[in-house]
Amino acid sequence: MKQIIINEKCNGCGMCVVKCPKYFEENDDGNTQVIKGVLSDETDKALNEVIAQCPVNAISFGGSVDKSKLMQQELDKLKELSKGLTVKREDIAFTDNYCVVTTFPYIGSSGYNYSSSSAAERAGMSEFRNRAWPCIDDKILDCITTYRVNIIKPYYSTDERSVYTKFNKKVVDVLTALANIVGKSNLPSDFCNVDVYPERDMVWKMLEKGEIIGENFIGIVRREFSYSPSNYESSIDWDDMEDYRGKDKYCYRAQDAVEELRRDVQNAVRWAKSDIEDSSLGYIRGLVDSYNKNLKACLEKKMQAITKKLI
């Protein structure tokens, strides 16, 4: 038996997929590929017709293949995959783009409504305390939530972005190749099915609700933020003008204080990066270990089915 080769001339017309689905399929990118593990029967009339009719001459026979050697190659891949997922610190990095704290409520300047500069400054400080200061946890949570959705969620989900779904797909590809080499009719009907995920334990459920990555991680950042509202008093400024009676009136300018607070919160988030990663890694490794245990049990059954056909 020989391999079937599709070269770079392929224009994706799909003729071979329609006329010869035994050998060809469309991949996730919409391109034509040879079905994994399938070897050619050079006497197959339909296959030879497709090769002859390909409008760009993209299909040909490759060299002869040792079926036993090909199977061993796929078994070696399966053995390597059976080791399961690994998660490293760089996989869950809390990068600088998650440290960006968005603008706090705009306070800006007041009207000239105050009879003294001190009265204006007190009013500005009161506005700062009431409107900007209470937003600190919400701003931290915005950063944490973005990180949770983009980086952590694939470790506690089962959708197409899940790291487990993607790894399952790699395993399925190898199992499909093995099934095509051995013959699907010689294997259990569910041989190529891999629907493995971690146990949905308390950590998984708390991650889904945002409880761990929410309250706990806000606390981690808060440890790096050692300021009180009084630290921003010096940034509350004032201005004066004469009214129509010739009396001085004053306003406050509080936006500099708000911007200073935003920068300080952003720095606190950045300083907490390492602790956030450490905490995330601890939660995720438990889920990955659970997945690897379940995957190993699943693949042991697949290997037993293959071994029976090799004996």
Image (cartoon, rainbow, N blue to C red):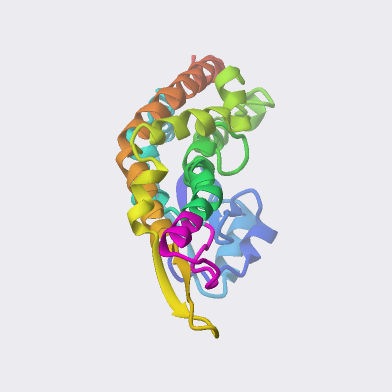
At x 35%, y 58%, the residue is 235
Is 304 or 264 nearer to us in this picture? 264
| x 54%, y 83%: residue | 245
What residue do we see at 60% from left, 70% from top?
A: 53
Query: Is residue 81 shown above or below 160?
Result: above
Q: Would you identify the image quadrant in which residue 168 lies?
A: top right
User: x%, y% of residue 133?
Assistant: 49, 47
Magenta run includes residue 113: yes
> Taking the image as drawn, is residue 18 in sight?
yes
119 sits to left or right of 301: left
Residue 121 at x, y percent in the picture = 43, 59
Corner quadrant of residue 111:
bottom right
- Of residues 282 and 48, the one drawn nearer to the viewer in this rendering: 282
Image label count: 0
Q: Main secondary structure of the magenta part?
A: loop
Residue bounds of the magenta highlight: 105-124
261 over 201 or under it: above or below = below
In the foreground, 170 or 121: 121
**Residue 24 at x, y percent in the picture:** 59, 54
- In the displayed structure image, the side of residue 258 where residue 30 appears, left or right: right
Q: Nearer the viewer, residue 95 or 90?
A: 95
- 311 drawn magenta: no
